[in-house]
Image (cartoon, rainbow, N blue to C red):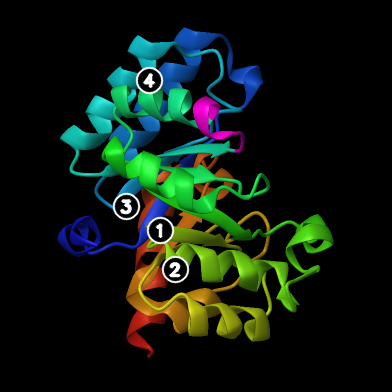
Amino acid sequence: MAAMKKKNSQLCVGLDPRPEIGGPDALLDFCITIVEKTSDCCFCYKPNTQYILPLGFSEIKELNDLIHDKGCLSISDHKLSDIGSTNRAALSWLSSMGFDALTYSPFPGNIKETIETAAGYGMGVITLTLMSNPEADYFMKGVVQGVPGYEFIAQQVAAFKGLGAVVGATCNVEDINRLHAVLTHQLILSPGVGAQGGGLDIVRVFKERTMVNVSRDIITHENPSERARYYQILINSAVKEM
C-alpha cells in the first residue's frame, strides 16, 4: 500500500497489447509507451502473459525495470495453476524477471503451498476468487464445504495470509460484502471497470485496499495519460465518499 499512498492512486493499468500491434518489438514498444504516458496516475501495472507471450526474458525484464524506475509495482497476470514443482519453476522465472506479485488460479487446490513458495521468492500471490466474467459463476459460486466457492477460496487466502484476491468490479454488492467479511487484511485486485461495465461498489466496500484494474479503456484510448488521470480521480473520489 506504500506505492498507492506515494502515488495517491489505486489505479492498476493492465498491459494487454493486442496481437495486431505486431511482433515482440512492437509489443514491447507499445507497453513502454503506455508506462511512460500513465505512470504519474497509477501505482502498478499488470502485464498479461497471454498478451505479451512473444516477449522474452530480457524484454520483460526491461519493461519491469522501467515500471520500477517510475515508482510503480508490476503484477504478472499469469494465472498460475499447476502442481507444486511446476509452480515453483514459474515463480523462479517470474521473480527473476522482476515481478512483485502474480495472479494465481486456485483450481488445483494448492493455495497454501503456492503462497508459501512465492514468499520464498519475495513475491505476493493474488488469488482468483470471484472473477468479472459471467461464466465465473459456474465454479466460483458452486457450493464447496457448505459455502459458495468464492467464499471458500477467500477463507483459504485469509488463513494462509495471501497478499490479495481478484474480485471483479462486476460482482454484486451481496457477494462483495460476503468477501469483505472474510478478507479483512488482503488487497483486492478488481478488474472489470471500464470496457466490461463494472462500477465502483468494490471500492466503496474495500476502500483503500482496492486495486482497480483498467486495461482496454486506457491503453486503447487516444490519450492514455488523460484517461488514466480520469480513473485516478474517479477512484479517489469513490474512496473519499466513505
Query: For the point 84% across and 60% down, which residue is it?
Result: 138
Q: Which residue is mark 1?
A: 162
Amino acid identity at mark 3: Cys
Q: Can residue 193 be spotted in the picture?
A: yes
Which x, y percent locates residue 160?
42, 61
Classify mark 3: helix, strand or loop.
loop
- Of callouts 3 and 2, the N-terminal one: 3
Query: How far is mark 1 from mark 2, CA to CA?
Result: 8 Å
Query: How far is mark 4 from mark 2, CA to CA?
Result: 32 Å
Q: Which residue is mark 2?
A: 159
For residue 138, above or below residue 97: below
- Of callouts 3 and 1, the N-terminal one: 3
The magenta segment is 81-86
Q: Which residue is mark 4?
A: 60
Amino acid identity at mark 2: Ala
Camera-side mark, 1 or 2 = 2
Viewer-side residue, 160 vs 193: 160
